[in-house]
């Protein structure tokens, strides 16, 4: 039909499998990025409210892994595993996150760190293998609230470093 336009958009292909969480953090981008790349920082803020993290192994490089346990406030331990698939300091980190290496339900996340004046806008864009796994993460594990709380913990951690005028 003359004059008809066809629109092609990539986003709808994964929209029902995605979670996107962002936050502006009042700290320089390099510091926010560093807080994600060094285990001495991660262990101080990673996870939702009331969780603590024990690292078993950590190697921040493409192909490297972070093997850790998140301890819930109710005493439940959650085995976690991350493999870094892309690292572009201080702008972007891509990773695969599951319970262990080879987890068929592992999901992909891309974190971007963008300057926002003197602050940093961090965005966590996660894509699950299926809509059902995304829905389970949201409903059973409260992934959206947990992600927001995790970024809130990161913000509190790095802004305290800035306030003290040094590194953590």
Image (cartoon, rainbow, N blue to C red):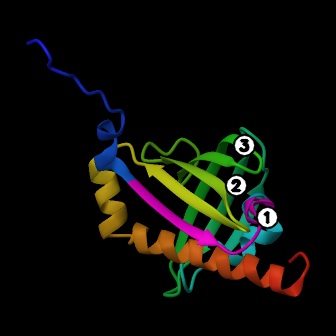
In the displayed structure, does residue 141 sit left or right of residue 112? left
- Let me know if residue 166 is in the magenta part: no
Q: Name the residue located 69 percent from the left edge and 75 percent from the top edge.
A: 26
What residue did someone put label 1 on?
39
| Residue that label 2 marks | 66
Q: CA distance from mark 3 to mark 2?
A: 14 Å
Q: Quadrant of the N terminus?
A: top left
Q: Which residues are magenta?
A: 19-34
Look at the numbered disc 2 and give the secondary structure of its residue: strand
The residue to which callout 3 is attached is 87
Q: x and y percent of residue 161 in the render?
A: 82, 80
Whether residue 100 is visible, yes or no, is yes
Question: In the rendered image of this protein, does residue 164 appear above or below residue 158?
Answer: below
Secondary structure under tag 3 reads: strand
Q: Answer above or below: position of 28 versus 5.
A: below
Marks 2 and 1 close (CB-CB < 8 Å): yes
The residue nearer to you, when weighing 105 against 168, is: 168
Q: Secondary structure at mark 1?
A: helix
């Amino acid at each position: 039909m003359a004059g008809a336009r066809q629109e092609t958009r990539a986003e709808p292909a994964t929209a029902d499998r995605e979670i996107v969480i962002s936050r502006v953090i009042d700290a320089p981008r390099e510091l926010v990025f560093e807080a994600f790349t060094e285990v001495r920082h991660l262990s101080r803020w990673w996870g939702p409210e009331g969780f603590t993290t024990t690292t078993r192994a950590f190697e921040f490089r493409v192909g490297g892994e972070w093997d850790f346990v998140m301890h819930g406030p109710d005493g439940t331990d959650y085995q976690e595993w991350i493999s870094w698939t892309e690292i572009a300091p201080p702008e972007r980190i891509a990773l695969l996150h599951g319970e262990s290496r080879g987890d068929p339900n592992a999901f992909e996340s891309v974190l971007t760190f963008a300057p926002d004046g003197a602050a940093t806008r961090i965005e966590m864009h996660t894509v699950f293998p299926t809509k059902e796994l995304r829905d389970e993460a949201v409903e059973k594990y409260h992934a959206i609230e947990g992600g927001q709380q995790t970024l809130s913990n990161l913000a509190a951690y790095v802004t305290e470093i800035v306030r003290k005028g040094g590194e953590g």
